[in-house]
Image (tube, rainbow, N blue to C red):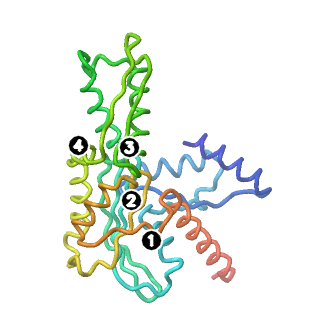
Amino acid sequence: MAMYISNLKKIIETKKATSVSFSVIGVPSYLTDSKRTAYLDAMEIAGFNRSNVHLMHEGSAIALEYVYNRRMMTGVVVFVDVGDCDTQVTVVRFYNMKLQVLRHESDRNLGGRDFDMVLFDYFADLFPNLHKGDYSMEMRSRLMMECEKAKIALSSNTEASISIESFMDESDFAEVITREKFQLLSSPLLCRITSTCEKALTGLDLDMTDVHSIELVGLGSQIPAISDHLSIFFKKNPLRTLKAKECVAHGCSMRSYHIKKNANNQIPGQ
């Protein structure tokens, strides 16, 4: 991670012709103290002063980005972030141009890649006389790539096909799956998403009528079945008013601006 951050720092400094010495990093809410320390260690190795690095929960960053153009927003919003490998739910109350994070909840082993695996298992079982344990690494990689493409295609089409030439022993592999079938196969995963939402609301003395809106973000959130299940659970349609891939980064940049602004406004010696 330190090498990645160091390289990213060099790219930014070269492009902007200025040094980068301050940073706000978005992290999952479920990170342990040791993992948070590891993030800070990596930033220090990459050339940052530890005191100039701030960690921010990704859900809080999304909420900050959300309220930026909604200064007079009042009410409770549930942010459902379905990433590549995890799902995070953040419940936030907005009032008087302020925000209060009421609850973070997560399923750290549920994300877009799990939906890829649903398709992988389905197609793998269709290949005659071949068990999943018999697949070579190359075969698994080729099939997984096609499954990811099919998942993306099903976001905007009612069916998707996969086609792999010379998949095994010079035999081609071609199959079609419908969105309805994919949704049926994904039912256990969809229930886990709504279960995470239910846990986030538990004990907050809120009912569904208190929830102003639901915002769906994240790389794995484009699957229509996720939106459909959330609509049933919350009894209202989720919205997608934020940029799914960029809202965390935008929120962190806003937090960085406000921290530096407050620091510059402090009276020396105070």
Residue at left 29%, top 77%? 211
Residue 185 is labelled as 4
Mark 3 residue type: Lys
The x and y percentages for residue 173 are 36, 23
Q: Earlier in the sequence, mark 4 or mark 3?
A: 3
Q: Earlier in the sequence, mark 2 or mark 4?
A: 2
Q: Earlier in the sequence, mark 3 or mark 2?
A: 2
The mark lying in front, picked from 3 and 2, is 3
The mark lying in front, picked from 4 and 1, is 4
Q: Earlier in the sequence, mark 4 or mark 1?
A: 1
- Mark 4 crowd level (few <14, some 14–19, many ≥20, 10 Å Cα): some
Mark 4 near mark 1, Cβ–Cβ under 8 Å? Answer: no
Q: Is 193 or 172 nearer to us in this picture?
A: 172
Q: Earlier in the sequence, mark 1 or mark 3?
A: 1
Q: Secondary structure at mark 1?
A: helix
The x and y percentages for residue 180 are 26, 48
The mark lying in front, picked from 2 and 4, is 4
What residue is pinned by disc 3? 151
Q: Secondary structure at mark 3?
A: helix
The x and y percentages for residue 62 are 46, 66
Q: Is 41 or 156 nearer to us in this picture?
A: 156
| Distance between mark 1 and mark 3 Cα atoms | 28 Å
What residue is pinned by disc 2? 81
Residue 63 is labelled as 1
Mark 1 residue type: Ala
Mark 4 residue type: Leu
| Distance between mark 2 and mark 1 Cα atoms | 11 Å
